[in-house]
Amino acid sequence: MRASIIVTSHNYGEFIERCLRSCLSQSLSPSEYEVILVDDASNDQTLEIVETFKSFANFRVIANKENVGVAESANIGIRAALGQYVVRVDADDFVNAHFLLFLSTYLAENHDAFGVACDYVMADESGEKQERRHAEEHPISCGILYRKDLLTKAGLYDARFRHLEEEELRKRLGESYRIHYLRIPLYRYRMHATNKTKRLAEMAPFREELARREAGRKA
């Protein structure tokens, strides 16, 4: 199988339907990719909503019995993935129909890349376009297609990081984190009141830990 999309979700039932519709409407043949939803012990209507997608042969649901955080949920999905490549899509975001085709074709032809990211469009709560951003200048944790074997060899995400898990991975891998960039906006990054990235107080301990590690490396 060419690629696996990993969607992690905790109480994002409000947005999950559009996310999954976009992921399951890729221009690749369904036999070439799969979509794995890892539900992180949601207590909203998420699991009821996703029942309507179980008719798709390339769709799977993994339901965590307890909340383990986005990093470990992503790891659970990656370990279960059958694809040569893996990519995360947040449950409140959605993607272009050619998302997997373009990114996987690029990796197949550029063997020096650990992964490839695309540009993205900021969208409001209703999904309407606001502005385009370049992933190289404004990196986010999703929309990066990785070679599964290399990501697994690197140790996947640090499960202790419930926030900033992608930044931790970048810093941990250093120069071996060789990401290429496609200047094509294939990802829609939705901004809304409950975005994980807006929980600044929750992020503070993880940012401090990254700063301590960096200081230790320079000492």
Image: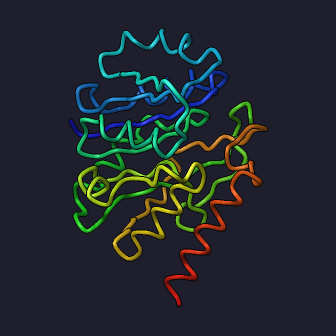
Who is closer to the viewer here, 101 or 1?
1
Image coords of residue 3 (percent x, y): 29, 40
Quadrant in which residue 53 is drawn: top left
Left or right: where does residue 205 sit relative to residue 55? Answer: right
Image coords of residue 20 (percent x, y): 49, 25
Q: Give the residue displayed 70% in from the left and 41% down from the top.
A: 195
Residue found at the very far bottom of the displayed protein: 219
Who is closer to the viewer here, 175 or 68?
68
Q: Give the residue displayed 38% in from the left and 29% down from the top.
A: 35
Q: Is residue 70 above or below residue 47?
A: below
Q: Is residue 142 above or below residue 150?
A: above
Q: Give the residue displayed 53% in from the left and 82% down from the top.
A: 216
Quadrant in which residue 115 is drawn: bottom left
Image coords of residue 135 (percent x, y): 54, 60
Left or right: where does residue 142 sit relative to residue 121? Answer: left
Q: Is residue 150 above or below residue 187?
A: below
Image quarter in which the N terminus is found: top left
Quadrant in which residue 189 is drawn: top right
Q: Give the residue displayed 49% in from the left and 54% down from the top.
A: 184
